[in-house]
Image (spheres, rainbow, N blue to C red):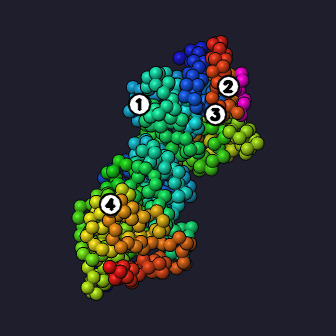
């Protein structure tokens, strides 16, 4: 997929996320909009994963540790044909498969997440199994920055480096906001690069909304032989909608009809 | 003390576990054992030396232990995750709930040195909460084998189960018990028949209950003993059969009196409209007295003499 095609995908995914949350009357608007460019690049430019090769242990694997931003994953999975797009209108409804966190009942979802600080250990296990069995499968794990205060992440970080898992890439959606406020106010995370480096990970940092840069950062793998990779993707919570960007109150706020229509008009302007 | 109730005649379930791990690893090339600096506690040091490519060490990090185990299963491996029961059942409870049970990754969770096996090391190391914590989680079988045979069979069954299983046992030698019928999860094992009373016991309290039943027989009381190795799913049919056939039932467990086998059986009996005289021999709601495993269990009446007294009193109420 060309860069222009990827950029157009990001716009249409943002429209789908807004529509999903508006119809569902629930969702994590800010976080889904901050990580959608990363998920777009992973599924459309980096990972070897599709409904056709889903049963193969050779394919790549995606674990979304920040499970609450599930709308961003649903719209991409639907677009790739893991399930029918019409199902996106069932979000949050009685007996829907599309609940507010990833569940393996949904085709294309690898692991049930929602409680924070779980995804990285599971990713370490998946990457270690691939290493032990000499499979080409790579594991990509999306972490929220707010969830990095969960100690289990750092247990997993030590294991990933110990087992030299250079088939594992974790990506931090560094949007600097969590439900209470700024991550710097809640519990300072910086110096984040130094922390991961000290834990033995090869670190890259890029603008998580610059499609070309995200593609570039994830194309040349591994980051370093014998080390797991950690990409800090600097992002903006609510990216793409002027009145949602950088607003802590949009963590899981649902747009009104007027706000929804305004947001959709903003997203008509293609990059 | 007969052979069936003399601990000197048996071996520790922990040692049997180490043997079965080697047997399962030989039969299944995909099998991995994940440990959290617990290979020594789990008697797996020899296994780790003989089959070094079958052990994954994560260090003292029980949350990571279970998360990594779930990931390895997702990656196509058969996985046994081992840690002292106390830490496995609650330090990693959320990983068991989310990453193993909810995500349906059938890790075999083995809690070693369960109950009050650690004796005078104190309450941090006692697992008197694991049945209660895990019974409330969907998609997990909770097992406490009563002897070496049940330990072997439970581990083999867990390897075939394709759904999450938690197995906990102690580290002291225990006697092998009579009546080795076909083993399956959720089916209790009747190891002694009786018509007056019944012990429904689990784990390493079963041989103590059998010793008490043997002693009661000498006083003319006919008391049956059930090894309810699977605490969840409970053998509801057998609990009801027992409840209908005797006038006094004592549930026995090396666990808190809250949320374990005793509570589970009481609910089954009440819902079935059965009302035998009923007591639970378990650890009361307190931090335990200090002492060895035997001393602690005896202090709380989970011993041949304590169970004898409890059942005698219950029978005499009839």
Q: Residues within 10 Å of mark 3 (few under 14, many from 20)?
A: some
Seen at 47% across and 78% down, the residue is: B300
Q: In this view of the protein, can residue A116 be seen by the observer?
A: yes
Q: Which residue is mark 3?
A: A252
Residue B56 against residue A11 in the figure, above or below: below
Badge 1 element: loop
Q: Main secondary structure of the magenta part?
A: loop
Q: Residues within 10 Å of mark 2 (few under 14, many from 20)?
A: many
Q: In this view of the protein, can residue B5 be seen by the observer?
A: no
How far apart marks 3 and 1 lie (CA) works out to: 31 Å
Seen at 44% across and 48% down, the residue is: B101
Q: Specify which label sits upstream in the sequence, 3 or 1.
A: 1
Q: Residues within 10 Å of mark 4 (few under 14, many from 20)?
A: some
How far apart marks 1 and 2 lie (CA) works out to: 31 Å
Seen at 24% across and 67% down, the residue is: B180
Query: Mark 1 — on which chain does it sit?
Result: A
Tags 3 and 1 on a common chain: yes
Query: Mark 2 — on which chain does it sit?
Result: A
Query: Mark 3 — on which chain does it sit?
Result: A
């Amino acid at each position: 997929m060309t860069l222009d095609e990827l950029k157009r995908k990001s716009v249409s995914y943002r429209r789908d996320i807004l529509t999903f949350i508006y119809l569902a009357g629930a969702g994590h608007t800010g976080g889904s909009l901050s990580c959608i460019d990363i998920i777009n690049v992973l599924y459309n430019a980096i990972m070897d994963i599709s409904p056709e090769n889903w049963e193969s242990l050779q394919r790549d694997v995606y674990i979304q540790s920040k499970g609450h931003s599930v709308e961003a994953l649903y719209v991409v999975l639907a677009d790739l044909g893991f399930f029918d797009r019409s199902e996106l209108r069932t979000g949050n409804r009685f007996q829907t498969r599309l609940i507010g966190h990833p569940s393996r009942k949904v085709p294309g979802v690898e692991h049930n997440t929602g409680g924070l600080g779980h995804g990285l250990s599971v990713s370490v296990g998946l990457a270690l199994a691939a290493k032990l069995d000499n499979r080409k499968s790579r594991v990509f794990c999306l972490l929220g920055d707010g969830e990095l205060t969960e100690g289990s992440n750092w247990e997993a970080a030590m294991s990933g480096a110990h087992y030299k898992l250079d088939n594992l890439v974790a990506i931090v959606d560094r949007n600097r906001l969590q439900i209470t406020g700024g991550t710097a106010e809640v519990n300072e995370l910086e110096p984040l690069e130094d922390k991961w480096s000290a834990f033995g990970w090869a670190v890259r940092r890029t603008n998580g909304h610059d499609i070309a840069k995200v593609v570039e950062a994830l194309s040349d793998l591994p980051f370093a032989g014998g080390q797991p990779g950690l990409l800090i993707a600097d992002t903006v919570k609510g990216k793409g909608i002027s009145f949602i960007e950088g607003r802590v109150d949009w963590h899981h706020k649902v747009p009104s009809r007027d706000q929804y229509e305004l947001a959709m008009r903003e997203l008509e302007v293609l990059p | 003390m007969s052979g069936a109730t003399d601990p000197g005649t048996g071996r520790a379930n922990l040692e049997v576990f180490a043997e079965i791990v080697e047997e399962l690893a030989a039969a299944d090339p995909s099998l991995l054992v994940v440990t959290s600096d617990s290979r020594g506690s789990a008697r797996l040091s020899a296994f780790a030396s003989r089959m070094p490519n079958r052990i994954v060490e994560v260090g003292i990090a029980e949350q990571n232990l279970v998360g990594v185990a779930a990931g390895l299963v997702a990656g196509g491996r058969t996985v046994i995750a081992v840690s002292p029961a106390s830490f496995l059942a609650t330090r990693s409870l959320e990983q068991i709930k989310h990453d193993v049970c909810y995500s349906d990754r059938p890790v075999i969770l083995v809690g070693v040195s369960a109950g009050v096996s650690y004796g005078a090391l104190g309450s941090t190391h006692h697992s008197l909460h694991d049945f209660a914590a895990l019974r409330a989680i969907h998609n997990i079988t909770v097992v406490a084998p009563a002897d070496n045979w049940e330990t072997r069979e439970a581990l083999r069954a867990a390897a075939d189960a394709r759904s999450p299983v938690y197995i906990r046992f102690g580290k002291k030698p225990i006697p092998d018990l009579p009546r080795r019928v076909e083993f399956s999860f959720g089916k209790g094992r009747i190891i002694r028949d009786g018509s007056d009373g019944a012990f429904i016991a689990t784990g390493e309290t079963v041989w103590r209950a059998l010793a008490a039943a043997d002693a009661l027989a000498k006083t003319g009381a006919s008391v049956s003993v059930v090894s309810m190795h699977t605490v969840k799913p409970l053998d509801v049919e057998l609990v009801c059969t027992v409840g209908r056939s005797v006038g006094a039932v004592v549930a026995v467990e090396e666990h808190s009196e809250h949320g374990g086998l005793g509570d589970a059986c009481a609910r089954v009996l009440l819902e079935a409209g059965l009302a035998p005289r009923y007591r639970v021999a378990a650890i009361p709601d307190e931090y335990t007295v200090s002492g060895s495993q035997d001393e602690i269990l005896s202090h709380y009446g989970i011993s041949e003499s304590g169970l004898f007294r409890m059942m005698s009193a219950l029978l005499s109420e009839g």
